[in-house]
Image: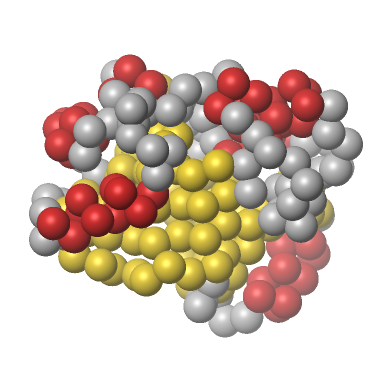
Amino acid sequence: MAEQPSETEAKFCVHNLSMTEAHLRELKAHLLVPRIFEINYRFDTSNGDLRRAGRVLRLRKDDLVHLTYKDNGQSIAGALTRREIEFVAEGFDSARQFIEALGYEVVFIYEKYRTTFEYKETQLMLDELPYGNFIEIEGELETLRPIAEELGLDWDKAIPVSYHALFERVCQSRGLTFRNLTFENFKETKVSPADMTIEYADVGKS
C-alpha cells in the first residue's frame, strides 16, 4: 500500500513579516518561491457536509493551479497534522467546472500573498492576509518547535485552526456580513489578533 501523504504544520500570527524574512536570509534559508498572489476557492456541498466532517476541498491559483483535498485535522503538541492530497491541474476554469460537476459549490474565497522558504528540512510560508500576517512552518512534528524558537516565535501561541476559521471569528467579533476574505472587503477594516481570539507570537517585535 502506498504511503498516505500528510502535512504537519504550525501557524503563528506576527507583527512583522519583513523582520522574519530578514532573519531567514541571515540564516541562509533557501527562497523557494518569491512573494506571489494567491486566490483560493473552497468547495462544499449545499449542506456543508465537508465542513461538518472537518474536510477541505480547495482550488488555488498562483502561477499554477493546485487542487487540494485535506482530511479532518488533529492537533498534536501545538501543531496540526492531517492527510493532504494535492496535484497541479491543467486550468483553473476547467478544474472548477469539474468540481462543480461532482455536486460541490464555492462556499468561501480567500486571498493572500505568500513567500516560501526552505530551512532545515522544513518549509516556511510567510503569509499576508487581509486580516493580518502569519507564518506557517511545515515539516516533521519534531522539527517544528525548534525552528519556531530559532525564529523567536512563542510556541504556546501557535494557532491550531484554519484561515477560514479565523475569518469566521473576525466576522462574529466585528459583525461583518461579507462572506469572502479578500483585500477589497477588508480595505476599510482594521483587524487585531483579539478579534480572532489569538495573540502575536513575536511579542516585542514591531
Residue drawn at x 68%, y 38% as measured from the top left: 190
Left or right: where 86 falls relative to 149: right
Instruction: Give whichever of 9, 46 is nearer the camera.
Output: 9
Pick the residue in front: 39 or 190: 190
Which quarter of the figure has residue 170?
top right
Q: Which of the 4 image quarters holds residue 174?
A: top right
Tell me the residue at 88%/36% (across/down). Answer: 177
Identify which residue, 68 or 181, lies in the foreground: 181
- x and y, in percent, of residue 158 in the image: 38, 26
Q: Is residue 10 visible?
A: no
Horizontal side, residue 90 vs residue 3: left or right: right
Residue lying furthest bottom in this view?
A: 90
Residue 110 image point, x, y percent: 67, 53
> Where residue 131 sits: x, y (%)?
62, 42
> How many marks can you see?
0
Say which quadrant the C terminus sits in. top left
**Closer to the camera in the image, 127 or 2:** 127
